[in-house]
Image (cartoon, rainbow, N blue to C red):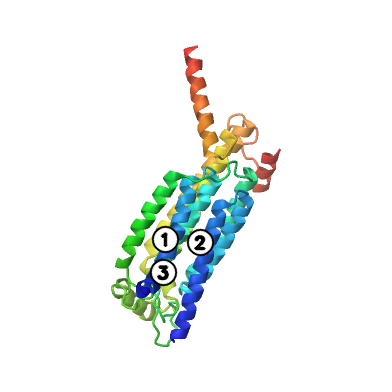
Amino acid sequence: MVDALISHYNYWLIIILMMLGLYVVVSRGNLVKKIVGLNIFQTSVFLLYISLGKVSGGTAPILTGKPEAFSNPLPHVLILTAIVVGIATTALGLALVVRIRESYGTIEEDDILISERSQDASDINGSSA
Amino acid sequence: MTASIDMVLIVDLVLLTLLCLTALAIMLVRHLFAVVALTGAFSLLSAGLLVTLDAVDVAFTEAAVGAGISTVLMLGTLALTKRREARSPKLSPIGLIIIFSTGATLIYATPDMPKFGAVDSPGLVHIVPSYIEGSENDIAVPNIVTAILASYRGYDTLGEVAVIFTAGMGVIILLGRRREDEYGYSEESAAFPLRPETSNDEEGKDKS
């Protein structure tokens, strides 16, 4: 049990972090906060990949001429790409938030829904009248 | 040897706990400016954690991109939108169900994963040894991550560039149209089709 705890605590804490991020995305109505939650989720996925590549007693994967054990460099490469893709999605999401704020005057999901519904209702009334 | 490993474990544990606390604070704080500041701290902590996990290149990128650029982008968004969350955080039953079921499934799967820091993890035996050898003999770049990123997996990096280009186009399309709407500007009616398009100009307009 203690052995399992030591060998997997890292994954468990990262999963807790992941779920915190997911909860922010699901439960918060503010669009900026949703994107922040998405960032937390993303970062925890990065950490999960990197901790899979960790070798105990290993060093950073840089050749120094000495015989050494390296941590797995492949997850590092994949996550480098993922970080940059993550910032691209964040930028696009934030641009959408700015655009939504201009059209609806709010960045709260509930208020957007309310104004959408009232607009729909007035459209229907306008066409029937 | 064991003492040094234990030290790494302790630092690792402390940083992960701090990350979880920061995430909790982000969840509970309503002032969005504080949320953005906490996001910056979150990125910096995760960069520190990445260093202890031997991923120095990733840590560098995370510190520059996560703590730097994304914080700046979020602050810019806050300047154009609102600074406060309108509703106080309340418990969302659906959210709780989702995170507990997902989290339980993930934790149920972890015993199948290699132990943390395992030397014989399956990821290490397949293609990585040839990458390490190749970066020494064929490419002659001391940093193995650089060798893989630019050479063995160069197409990934090309795809990444395509993604950034697409995202940049999306941002320009989304925010560029705005200026036309606001001022009733269109190509036909404009005496001078080229208008100054500096970012300072844009922010000034929004405040007015």
- Label 1 residue SS: helix
Which of A87 and B104 lies nearest the eye of the viewer? B104
Q: Amino acid at mark 1?
A: Ile
Q: Earlier in the sequence, mark 3 or mark 1?
A: 3
Q: Position of residue B117 (x, y in %)?
A: 38, 75
Residue type of the residue flagged with mark 3: Tyr
Tell me if residue A58 comes above or below residue A103 in the rendering: below
Q: Amino acid at mark 2?
A: Cys
Label 3, on which residue? A9
Labels 3 and 2 within one chain: no
- Per the model, the C-alpha gap separating discs 3 and 2 is 13 Å
Residue at 48% across, 52% down: A38
Q: Which mark is residue B20?
A: 2
Q: Quadrant of the N terminus of chain B?
A: bottom left
Query: To which residue does mark 1 refer?
Result: A15
The foreground one among A41 and B110 is: B110
